[in-house]
Structure formats: structure tokens, C-alpha cells
Amino acid sequence: MSSSMKLLVPGVDLSVQASPGPLSELELALQGEHAAQAREKALAALGAIEDRLRSKAAAGLPPADYAVLTALQDACQAARETLTIPVHRP
């Protein structure tokens, strides 16, 4: 996957921003023929990240790093929830 992302600026007309369409290769994959496989791959990657974060927490963290770790765990949870939202296609 490439690291290119489209930037959407709140309050700015979409017609003057990046072209409409998927914001990332993951979004495109989730709309494609192999959406289930793309979802599983993304969930597995999130699981690996969450495992590393738990290992870091178990090893002990300086107080300043705890807030960062918590934010990363929250971001992983939000991504997991987003990826598991039921999608109903017409």
C-alpha cells in the first residue's frame, strides 16, 4: 500500500479539493471483489499492532509515554470498530 492519502479540509468545497473517490488503497480494497480478504488482512495488522502495544505496556512505560500508548490503543480500537461495521450493498 502506498502512503498517499487525500486531505479533506473541513469547510472547503469538495470540488476544489482532491478528486472524489476512496481516500486510501484500503478503502478501495474494501469496496472491491476481495473485500473480505482485505478486511481480514487489515484486522490482522491491527491485532499485531495491539499485541506490540500491550507488550510495551507490560514492560513498563515512563509516565509521559502512557498517554501516547493509550491514544494508540484507542486508535486501534476505533479502526477495528470501523472495519467491523456491517456493510449492506444494494
Image: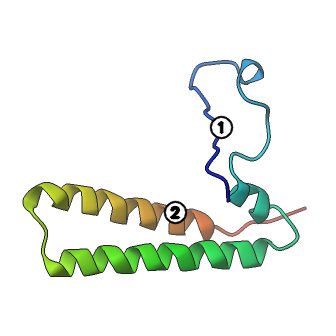
Q: Dot 2: few (<14), some (14–19), or many (≥20) neighbours within 10 Å?
A: some
Disc 1 marks which residue? 6
**Which residue occupies 63% across, 43% down?**
5
Residue 15 drawn at (x, y percent):
77, 21
Q: Is residue 71 left or right of residue 65?
A: right
Q: Position of residue 8 (x, y in %)?
A: 62, 31
Q: Amino acid at mark 2?
A: Ala
As drawn, is 65 to the left or to the right of 70? left
**Which residue appears farthest toward the front when viewing the image?**
2
With 48 as the anchor, is 69 left or right in this view?
A: left
On screen, residue 9 above or below 66: above
Work out which residue is located at the far left of the displayed protein and give it: 63
Residue under the point 79% across and 42% down: 21
Q: Quadrant of residue 50?
A: bottom left
Query: If the image is split into quadrants, where does the N terminus sit?
Result: bottom right
Residue 61 is drawn in which quadrant? Answer: bottom left
Q: Position of residue 68 (x, y in %)?
A: 25, 56
From the viewer's perspective, is 16 left or right of 56?
right
Location of the C terminus (image quadrant): bottom right
Return the disc, 2 or 1, that comes first in the chain's sequence: 1
Between the residue at mark 2 and the residue at mark 1, the CA separation in whole angstroms equals 18 Å
Q: Residues within 10 Å of mark 1 (few under 14, many from 20)?
A: few
* Secondary element at image label 1: loop
Q: Residue at x 56, y 80 (%)?
A: 44
Amino acid type, mark 1: Lys
Q: Looking at this view, is 81 or 51 the one in front?
A: 51
**What residue is disc 2 on?**
79
Reply above or below: 50 against 30.
below
